[in-house]
Amino acid sequence: MPEIGYARSIIDDTPVNGELEKAPSSNWAYDHAVNKDAHHAVFVNRGDSGAYDFTLANLITDGAWRDLDLSAIVPAGALAVLLLILLKDDSAFSLVSLRRNGNTGTIAISRCYIQVADTYTGMDRIVALDAGRVIEYATTNTTFNDISILVKGWWI
């Protein structure tokens, strides 16, 4: 049976340049474990947080698309952000929508909605970032009881 060259090099490639002290056993595995350029992005967990980053008091709930600036939290070069959204309202199916800043289409939108009135609903959403680390949000209801947003991490 013929050998497949690329599979052999992944498995049998001897580490070089000090890689013997590293956990992966091949150049390919080492490069992909520590070099974001080898696989394009790395998720950065922000860690524990003592409070939400944005609450209803920080947000405008008038139905229009509004900017949400994450640049004080997310570092330059980040590609996307993982958000925890916590909602409560006295009306089922009230929506908070999120999208990349500058997008205008109606398909590439992350939506968070109240499933049951007067009950908290929590969900994680991934939203692409623009170069300034700004996203956009819009609401369908102007009188939410609570909206809380936490940045859990980002891809860079």
Image: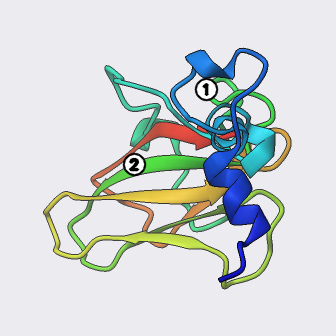
Label 2: state its secondary structure.
strand
Residue 40 seen by the camera: no
The part of the image, by quadrant, that contains residue 7 is bottom right
Q: Is residue 155 above or below residue 71?
A: below
Identity of the residue drawn at 34% across and 24% down: 48
What residue is drawn where x is 67% and y is 52%? 10
5 relative to 22 in the view: left or right: right
Rendering coords of residue 81 (x, y %): 59, 47
Up-down relation of residue 67 to residue 45 (above or below)? below
What residue does disc 1 label? 73
Q: Residue at x 69, y 84 (%)?
A: 106
Q: Is residue 130 above or below residue 23?
A: below
Residue visible at 38% across and 32% down in the picture: 52
* Disc assigned to residue 55: none
Quadrant of the image containing the N terminus = bottom right
Give coordinates of residue 14: x percent, y percent. 69, 35
Judge by depth and name the residue closer to the eye, 136 or 133.
Answer: 133
Q: Quadrant of the C terminus?
A: top right
Mark 2 sits on what residue? 84
Marks counted in the figure total: 2
Q: Residues within 10 Å of mark 1 (few under 14, many from 20)?
A: few
Using a 10 Å C-alpha cutoff, classify the residue at mark 2 as few (fewer than 14 neighbours), some (14 to 19) or many (20 or more).
some
Q: Is residue 44 above or below residue 139?
A: above
* 125 relative position to 136: left or right: left
SS at circle 1: loop
Which of 19 and 66 lies nearest the eye of the viewer?
19
**Disc 1 to disc 2, C-alpha distance:** 14 Å
Q: Quadrant of residue 72?
A: top right
Q: Earlier in the sequence, mark 1 or mark 2?
A: 1
The amino acid type, in three-letter code, at marker 2 is Leu
Asked if one can make out residue 100 in the rendered structure from this viewpoint, the answer is: yes
